[in-house]
Image (spheres, rainbow, N blue to C red):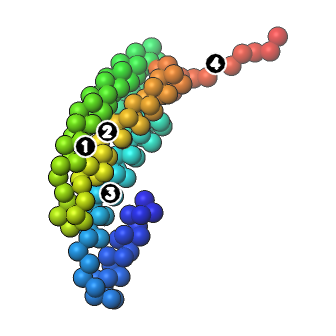
Amino acid sequence: MVALVLDVWLGVIDRYHFHWQLPWPETLARYLMIWAAMLAVSSGIARREHIGLTTVIDRLPFGLRRTLLMISDVLALALFAYLLWFGIGFATGGANKQAMIFGVSMAPFYAAIPVSAAVCCVQLILVILRDKGRQGEPATVEMPK
């Protein structure tokens, strides 16, 4: 995010103050934005913050909620494992393509897909181990004897 902000600032300063007419800040900002958005997905996974899913699940009884959360975790893990597997091929295929403005391989830019998918897989495994589908259940308080 720091690189994205600095790049956008450079583009704005260039456009309105220095008039260097740099061709690359806008393109670099686009790729940095993709990286930031893709990596932000794992943060949402760690906190279980999915608007559509939590709206429905929070209204269900705890037994059904636990089952649906476990099923959705396993399905999401399968989805991100699929993205990881095919994203690796996508990123390695980008090694043969060059960004016209930068003159470098597109592989680092395309790598946002498999890298973020791998991080999401790790986050999902950690969430499954942490919650075991018990998100939102009332805490059971043991009374002292």
Name the residue located 36 percent from the left edge and 21 percent from the top edge.
Answer: 74
Image location of residue 66, percent across then percent down:
44, 18
Mark 1 vs 2: CB contact within 8 A: yes
Q: Mark 3 belongs to which amino acid? A: Met
Which residue bears the numbered disc 2?
114
State the count of labels: 4
Image location of residue 104, percent across then percent down:
25, 59
Q: Secondary structure at mark 1?
A: helix
Q: Mark 1 belongs to which amino acid? A: Ala
Whether residue 21 is situated above or below residue 29 in the rendered picture: below
Name which of mark 1 and mark 4 comes first in the sequence.
1
Name the residue located 41 percent from the left edge and 63 percent from the top edge.
Answer: 3
Query: Which image quadrant: the N terminus?
Result: bottom left
Which residue bears the numbered disc 3?
33
Mark 3 vs 1: CB contact within 8 A: no
Name which of mark 2 and mark 3 comes first in the sequence.
3
Q: Which-is-in-front pick, marks 3 and 1?
A: 1
Q: Which-is-in-front pick, marks 1 and 2?
A: 1
Whether residue 65 is situated above or below residue 50 in the rendered picture: above
Q: CA distance from mark 1 to mark 4?
A: 47 Å
Mark 3 vs 4: CB contact within 8 A: no
Count neighbours of disc 3 (C-alpha within 10 A) and say few if under 14, some if 14 to 19, many if 20 or more: some
Q: CA distance from mark 2 to mark 3?
A: 16 Å
Check residue 91 in the rendering and tell me which mark sits there, or answer none.
Answer: 1
* Residue 64 makes an appearance in the image: no
Give whichever of 42, 49 is nearer the camera: 42
Whether residue 60 is situated above or below residue 46 in the rendered picture: above
Q: CA distance from mark 1 to mark 2?
A: 8 Å
